[in-house]
């Protein structure tokens, strides 16, 4: 976490949490969802404004974490901005050299591969569960063919409970 964020937490420890304003889609893109967008429909049917500002994206990435209830959030100064997840807390980008990087740029060590009923590939890692980016399926197929991964069947609806995360944090569901 950024030092400036830690200082803000100490200075203003009781700032209310924010829900519904930030979302992560299945391709690892962040979306701002103002009140108008929230009223227009649920995420991901209505996504909102895609965040493209490099410094803001880096700030979110450095301050992205999980609470004790399995809710993911971005610590924005003294305020926790809880994240709605289209799929999983991590979106994996596969590298030609075999490394696995998260949508935030963190490197992960693969522990297991899972394949759901829709053909989506997930990796359980030391960071947690994530969905493999659709653009990286050729590299994923190479890993499976080389025997590095042996995907096991899974039902997508069971993943949040099995891996301890919430896709749509709500104030009454926070720990």
Image (spheres, grey):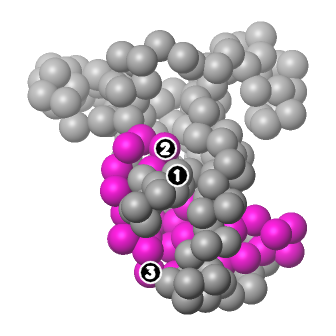
Element assignment for label 1: strand
Q: Nearer the viewer, residue 98 or 4?
A: 98
> Disc 2 and disc 3: Cα gap in Å?
18 Å
Task: Decide: few, some or many residues near mark 2? Use Cα within 10 Å; few <14, some 14-19, many ≥20.
Answer: many
Q: Position of residue 82 (x, y in %)?
A: 51, 37
Q: Cα distance, mark 2 to mark 1?
A: 7 Å
Q: Is residue 62 left or right of residue 16?
A: left
Q: Which mark is residue 93?
A: 1
Where residue 110 sits in the image (x, y, percent)?
Answer: 44, 74
- Tell which of 164 and 28 is nearer to you: 28
* Residue at disc 2, secondary structure: loop
Q: Nearer the viewer, residue 100 or 117?
A: 100
Q: Residue at x 33, y 25 (%)?
A: 59
Q: Residues within 10 Å of mark 1 (few under 14, many from 20)?
A: many
Q: Quadrant of the C terminus?
A: bottom left
Q: Are marks 2 and 3 in contact (CB under 8 Å)?
A: no
Magenta span contains residue 157:
no
Q: Which residue is mark 3?
A: 111
For the record, the magenta segment spans 102-131
Q: Is residue 9 left or right of residue 42?
A: left
Q: Nearer the viewer, mark 3 or mark 1?
A: 1
Circle 2/circle 1 CB separation < 8 Å = yes
Q: Quarter holding the N terminus? A: top left
Q: In the figure, 64 relative to 109: above or below? A: above
Residue occupying image coordinates x 64% and y 20% = 50
Residue for badge 2: 103
Can I make out residue 31 in this image?
Answer: yes
Residue 80 can be seen in this image:
no
User: Image height check: is 9 above or below 1?
Assistant: above
Mark 2 or mark 1: which is in front? 1
Label 2 or label 3, whichever comes before in sequence order: 2
């Amino acid at each position: 976490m950024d030092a400036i964020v830690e200082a803000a937490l100490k200075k203003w420890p009781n700032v209310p949490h924010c829900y519904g304003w930030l979302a992560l889609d299945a391709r690892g893109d962040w979306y701002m969802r103002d009140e108008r967008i929230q009223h227009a429909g649920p995420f991901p049917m209505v996504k909102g404004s895609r965040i493209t500002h490099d410094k803001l994206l880096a700030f979110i990435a450095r301050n992205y974490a999980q609470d004790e209830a399995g809710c993911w959030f971005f610590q924005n100064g003294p305020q926790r901005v809880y994240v709605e997840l289209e799929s999983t807390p991590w979106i994996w980008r596969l590298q030609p050299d075999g490394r696995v990087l998260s949508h935030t740029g963190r490197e992960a060590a693969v522990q297991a591969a899972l394949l759901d009923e829709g053909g989506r590939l997930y990796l359980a890692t030391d960071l947690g569960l994530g969905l493999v980016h659709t653009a990286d399926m050729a590299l994923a197929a190479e890993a499976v063919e080389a025997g590095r991964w042996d995907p096991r069947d899974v039902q997508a609806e069971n993943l949040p409970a099995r891996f301890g995360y919430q896709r749509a944090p709500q104030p009454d569901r926070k720990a």
